[in-house]
Image (cartoon, helix red, strand yellow):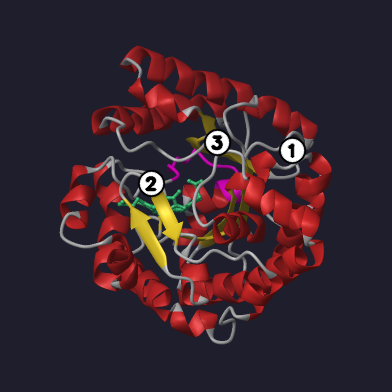
Amino acid sequence: MNENSLFIRACKRQETERTPVWIMRQAGRYLPEYRAIREKHDFLTMCKTPELASEVTVQPIDIIKTDAAILFSDILVIPEAMGMNLDIIESQGPVFDSPIRSAKAIENLNIEGVVERLNYVMEAVKMTKEKLAGRVPLIGFSGSPWTLACYMVEGKGSKNFDIIKSFIYNEPAAAHRLLQILADSIIEYLNAKIRAGCDAVQIFDTWASILSPSDFEEFSLKYIRYICENLETGGAPVIVFAKGVSSYAKLAELKCDSLGVDWTKEIGTVRKEINGTKALQGNMDPTVLFAPKQKIREETERVLESYGTGAGHVFNLGHGILPKTPVENTQYFVECVKELSAKYHA
Ligand code: CP3
């Protein structure tokens, strides 16, 4: 059933009767139903309890009516499973209490059995598939090696990422060792998620944006390429979202099906740049959902128009939905995509 879903077909650049839509971070704090559960449990407990993770995964399908679900979890469960102590602090975001600052710290990571320790994710996938009962496909995800390394070395979010960048310039061998360890774990992890039932997988490279084009090639793209080449997808589409990159030419050569586009580019220009060789996912500015309804409708139309007619567009925001976004506007946005997109398809 899911192979014929709008989302999977669009990822594979097959014709659809309208453009499918889902929203990055759709299982999250902007939903009162999410906050009600989150009030009673801490974030990691939610990730580690399949009953709770599957419940919040399905919430946006019922409430926002998106065309795909994304498993509630976090990219940082991999470093957590390698033995790094993770805290999600309300005002600050994720924090690791002992970040990696040396080659020795990398050797101390517990890299055997990571995916076994993440078995709770596979259980959440299975339970979510049962709750979805074929209504929409389920997306599994991972951070890219580079984006995970940013958090593991910085210890938290950062303004200018001077610690991770000093690390790659001063200790390139150790940095590459860390990125390779992560890439190998990510392959195993995404393969396990697909085996457990995920219909597609997305690799988030949120911090691609802080690298020069040549550093992006050396410290990020190289490892994404390696992951894409070693996944056992069984036909599940692979989506790569590298935020803030200046060119899509090299991304278009990856062994993947779809590329995410942030809102600083014209999606139609990217489509031309890569000559339609990949499906594209995006790319409305998330803050447009704070605008009056008329503006939301106009911007939805503008993105559809920019992509143009034909197959291979998955509508999304250009990055995750923000915690204060009004639910009503989000529902309206999804309705707009569904209604306005039909005329772009034969
Ligand atoms: O998309 C979804 O709805 C699925 C769930 C999901 C979460 N995090 C849940 C979450 C996904 C796909 C992620 C990915 C993620 N996590 C990324 C890559 C995508 C991006 O947005 O750039 C990154 C960089 C992280 C790391 C992370 N986790 C941050 C920066 C934060 C705090 C700030 C924030 O955006 O909320 C988290 C915590 C987190 N992950 C929350 C949720 C719902 C909020 C936790 C809470 O309820 O307090």
Q: Does the stretch in magenta take in 290?
A: no
Q: Amino acid at mark 1?
A: Gly
> What is the x, y in percent for residue 235?
62, 66
Q: Splitting the image into 4 quarters, where does residue 94 fall?
A: bottom left
Give residue 276's mark: 1
Report x, y in % for residue 283: 55, 32
Q: Is residue 116 above or below residue 294?
A: below
Of marks 3 and 2, the one in the foreground: 2
| In the displayed structure image, the side of residue 313 where residue 339 appears, left or right | left
Mark 1 lies on a secondary structure that is: loop
Task: Give the structural element (helix, strand or loop) at label 3.
Answer: strand
**x then y, percent, for residue 281:** 57, 40
- Report the magenta residues as a range: 10-24
Along the polypeptide, which appears first: circle 3 or circle 1?
Answer: 1
Q: CA distance from mark 1 to mark 2?
A: 39 Å
Left or right: where does residue 18 sit relative to residue 246? left
Residue under the point 32% across and 48% down: 28
Q: Locate the C terminus and report the quarter of the image it occupies.
A: top right
Residue of label 2: 92
Q: Earlier in the sequence, mark 1 or mark 2?
A: 2
Residue drawn at x 70%, y 65% as measured from the top left: 179
Looking at the picture, which amino acid does disc 2 mark?
Answer: Gln
- Which comes before the other along the chain, label 3 or label 2? 2
Q: Secondary structure at mark 2?
A: loop
Asked if the residues shown at circle 3 and circle 1 are in contact, with their CB atoms under 8 angstroms apart, the answer is no
Determine whether 318 is above or below 158 in the image. above
